[in-house]
Amino acid sequence: MSETGSPINDSFQPLNNAPQWFLDNIRIPGKSILTQVAGRSVHMLAWNWDNTELPTLMLVHGFGAHSHWWSFLAPFFRDRYRIVALDLPGMGDSEPPAVYEDNCFARAIVGCIEQHQLQPVCIIGHSFGGAQSLRATVMSPHLFSHGIVVDTNVRLPPEPLIRKLQPKGSHKPSPTRAECMTRFRLVPPQPNHIDALVHYIAFHSCAGEQQNWHWKSDPNCLNVGEIEDPDLLRAVSIKIDMIYGGKSFLNIENKPERVLAHFSRAGKLLTIPEAGHHIMVDHPLDLVAAIKALLIN
C-alpha cells in the first residue's frame, strides 16, 4: 500500500466553506492498519508508517468517537513523526472487546504498540481517550516517552462518581448515510464549532449499506476505565502535559491545575481561552500549536 493509503471515499463532499488547510490535510489520508489484540481486531490510521526511524506520535479519540477526529490534524505532524490514530475497541473500525472492563481500552493501546514495535511513544488523548492513555502508561510505562492529556475528565474526591452509561442494545437505523449524518451531535453539546470539520467527522461516524445506516460505534459500548482514583494519576511515571479549553465544562474550580499536581512528573498546563471541550472542532489550529509547543519542551 502506498504512503497515503486508500483514497477518501468518493462520496464524501466537503462543505463549501471548508478551510483550505482542512482540504489539504484530508488529501493525505492515513494508511489503515489492523492489529489483533486479545483475539479482536484493532484499527489504526497511520502516516509515515514505513519511516521507522521517526519517533511515534499516537493520537487517541474520545468516547464513542473514532480516529477521524484526529485525521484532519495528523498531517500537521508528518515533518517530525510517524503518526498513528487509534480506534479504541468498540469504536470506529475496531471490534468490541470480549468484555468492557476498566483496562480493555488500555490493553488495545499497549497491544498495538508492542506488536508493531512503535515504542517509545508520545501519546495524546482527548477526553475519554486521555484517561485510557494514562491507564496505558501505568500498565506499560517502558513503552511511552511523554503524554499529553487534552480536556479529560478526572474525578477528584469528593466529586460525585462519573455517570456510567448503559448499553443501548442497538442503534436507530437511517435509510441513507446523509440522513444518518444529520443525526450526528457533539456530546457534550458545543454550539461553537467549524461546520466543515463536524460534517467530516459525522461522515466517518456512519456505517452501513442500502437502507441500513447506523453509527459505527458498538451500541453496547460502556465508558468503563474513566479515572476516579487519584492514586492512578500518582502511578504515572512519565512526563504529562495537559491542554484544556478555557470554556470547557471541565475547566472549573481550577480542576486542571489540581489534576496536574497529582503527576510525579507534571509538565505544563496550556489553556486555549475560547475553546470548548471538543477543541479540535472549534480551535483546531490553536490545538495543533499547543501540541507542537509541548512536543519541543
Image: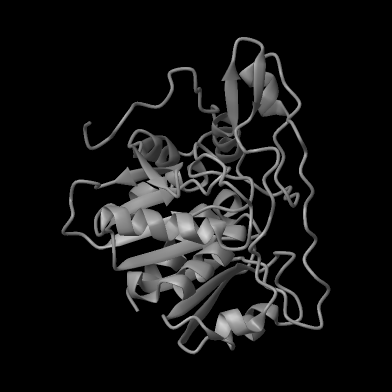
Front position in the image: 173 or 192? 173
55 vs 148, left or right, is left
Q: Residue furthest top?
A: 210
Q: Position of residue 268 (x, y in %)?
A: 49, 81
Q: Position of residue 5 (x, y in %)?
A: 29, 32
Q: Position of residue 157 (x, y in %)?
A: 77, 83
Front position in the image: 177 or 99? 99
**Is residue 107 in view from this perspective?**
yes
192 vs 137, left or right, is right
Location of residue 243 with respect to 112 vertically, above or below: below
**Is residue 72 in view from this perspective?**
no
The C terminus - image quarter: bottom left
Q: Position of residue 49 (x, y in %)?
A: 25, 47
Front position in the image: 80 or 273? 80
Q: How many marks?
A: 0
Say which residue appears at 30% left-offset and 46% top-offset. 47
Location of residue 109 with respect to 209 vertically, above or below: below
172 vs 216, left or right, is right
Say which residue appears at 44% left-offset and 57% top-offset. 109
Front position in the image: 128 or 96? 96
Say which residue appears at 47% left-offset and 67% top-offset. 136
The N terminus - image quarter: top left
Location of residue 11 with respect to 93 vertically, above or below: above
- Check the image and tell me how it is coloured: one colour
Q: Give the image quarter of residue 45.
A: top left
Say which residue appears at 64% left-offset and 45% top-offset. 64
Q: Give the image quarter of residue 24.
A: top left
Location of residue 192 with respect to 161 vertically, above or below: above
Q: Give the image quarter of residue 90.
A: top right
212 vs 48, left or right, is right
